[in-house]
Image (cartoon, rainbow, N blue to C red):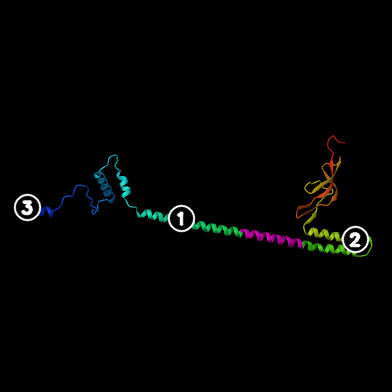
Amino acid sequence: MAGDDERDDRDGGEQEPEPGFYLDLDAEEDDVDRVTREALEALERERPVEQGESPAPHGELLATARPRGAGDEDDAEGEAMTIARLEEELAELRDRSIRTLADFDNFRKRAERERDELRRLTRSDMLRDFLPVLDNLERALSAGGSVEDLKLGVEMTLKQFRDLLRQHGVVAVESVGAPFDPNVHEAVVRDEDRDAEVPMVTEELQRGYTVQGRLLRPAMVRVAVPLEEGEE
């Protein structure tokens, strides 16, 4: 019947969409972000606004509606891995610095022991070299003979002693007839001399010595100094 046919045509044919916004996600040409934004705008327009409430911008709805992406999780995981790697490197550097300090402390202690041992050995060798001088002095005292023989023995022992000092780098300071040098001379007596142009050493009261170029003991000397102007 005509009425039934008309109903069948209405039922089987395309139905008009209900009022509102129609979201077709199957269309390949539609952009998902654009479609989502338009859908939220439509919902915002249709949602009744209560009294005193201001409608929220669709940007906030998009921000809250958009799910958290996988990129954020990757960034957090990357930061955690970076922090773990830096902590591991810091621990390694700390351990290395501790080992370095321990090695340096051991080296310092070993160097001090070796220096002390070398000083003892050097002192022992030098003292061993002086023992023959002591032996000769004892022989000179125990030997019989005249005063001249005793004097000759002492002179020979003195020469031996000076040669031994020279072998160890001990040299006497030049004094008598040399200009006064406060670096190696110590003036004990001071004489004014009108013939002196510069302070000169005229007498050596106690001999001074240097060892390897360094002052071991200054020489005590008598010094002649020129007269100052106006003095007789």
Rendering coords of residue 200 (x, y %): 83, 45
Q: Indicate left or right for 196 with 39 as reference.
A: right
| Residue 166 figure quarter | bottom right
Disc 3/disc 2 C-alpha distance (Å) = 166 Å
Q: Residue furthest right?
A: 146
Between discs 1 and 3, the one toward the N terminus? 3
Q: Which mark is residue 98?
A: none
Identity of the residue drawn at 58% across and 58% down: 100
Residue 3 disc label: 3
User: Which residue occupies the extreme left position in the image?
Assistant: 1
Tell me the residue at 76%/61% (across/down): 123
Front position among marks 2 and 1: 1
User: Magenta part of the protein: which range?
Assistant: 104-124
Q: Amino acid at mark 3?
A: Gly
Q: Is residue 106 magenta?
A: yes
Label number found at residue 83: 1
Question: How dense is the environment of label 2, judged by Cα within 10 Å: few (below 14), some, or many (20 and up)?
Answer: few
The x, y position of residue 52, in whole percent, is 29, 39
| Residue type for callout 1 | Ile
Looking at the figure, which quarter contains the N terminus?
bottom left
- Picture disc at residue 152: 2
Instruction: Say whether marks 2 and 1 touch (CB < 8 Å).
Output: no
In the structure shown, which secondary structural element does the residue marked by tag 1 occupy?
Answer: helix
In the image, is residue 196 part of the stretch drawn in magenta? Answer: no
What secondary structure is the stretch in magenta mostly built from? Answer: helix
